[in-house]
Image (cartoon, rainbow, N blue to C red):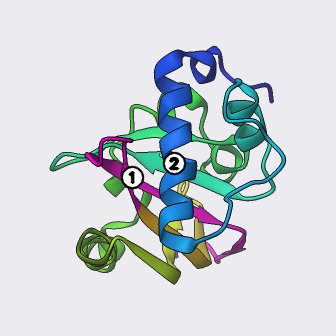
Amino acid sequence: MSAPDALKSPEMLRHLDNVMASYMRFFDELLISGISRETDSIAEHLWRADFVLLSHGGGSDPVFNFGNRMALELFEMDYAALTALPSRQSAEPVSQEERNQLLAQVTAFGCIDHYRGVRISATGKRFYIENARVWNLYDPEGNYTGQAAMFREWTALEEKPA
């Protein structure tokens, strides 16, 4: 799966730079090392990263604005579908309250580490994510622009009975 052209836009490159800078701000470590922040290699490296990376904008019903290759594979959708999806729809209705509490904690404290919860793919496959990091995103002027999440661990769950 090759990176979508949308990842090469100046807006996306600024967004991904904010993702990386905000990660450093909250976790005091690089999200991914060995890349130059001045080139589109940021997008390519984050696209091919060995972890799931997602982000969404702000607002009352935020929509995903980025998902890397691993995220698209796990959620079983293409980039266009993901970036049109309200992020709340990545969790089952029974998991919404848990997800809402998570996002409230991140909003209040700026980040959360070791999050775990159930998510659902576009085809209805359920999976349990573990040790996720979720953090607020800020632009260089300090304006809140959304939230991002990354994780490396997930387990497929058995299908729900019909």
- What crowding class fits label 2: few (fewer than 14 Cα within 10 Å), some (14-19), or many (20 or more)? many
Image x and y of residue 66, in percent = 52, 38
Does residue 82 appear to the left or right of 97 in the view shown? Answer: right
Q: Are marks 1 and 2 in contact (CB under 8 Å)?
A: yes
Can residue 96 be seen here? yes
Residue lying at 74% horizontally and 54% vertically, measured from the top left: 32
Q: In the displayed structure, would residue 36 be above or below residue 114?
A: above
Image x and y of residue 20, in percent = 58, 50
Image x and y of residue 143, in percent = 25, 45
Give the amino acid at mark 1.
Leu
Image x and y of residue 101, in percent = 26, 79
The N terminus, quarter of image: top right
Residue annotated with mark 2: 19
- Residue 23: name its quadrant: bottom right
Q: Which numbered tag is attached to residue 137?
A: 1
Can residue 123 be seen here? no
Query: Disc 2 on helix, strand or loop?
Result: helix
Residue lying at 63% horizontally and 18% vertically, measured from the top left: 8
Question: Farthest left residue?
Answer: 60
Depth check: give the residue in front, 17 or 61: 17
Per the rendered image, the range of residues in magenta is 136-162
Q: CA distance from mark 1 to mark 2?
A: 6 Å
Decide which of tag 1 and tag 2 comes sooner along the chain: 2
User: Residue 87 magenta-drawn?
Assistant: no
User: Residue 140 magenta-drawn?
Assistant: yes
Query: Disc 1 on helix, strand or loop?
Result: strand
Depth check: give the residue in front, 44 or 72: 44
Does residue 82 appear to the left or right of 71 in the view shown? Answer: left
Q: In the displayed structure, would residue 159 be above or below residue 146?
A: below
Q: Which numbered tag is attached to residue 60?
A: none
Question: Farthest front residue?
Answer: 141
Residue lying at 39% horizontally and 46% vertically, measured from the top left: 56
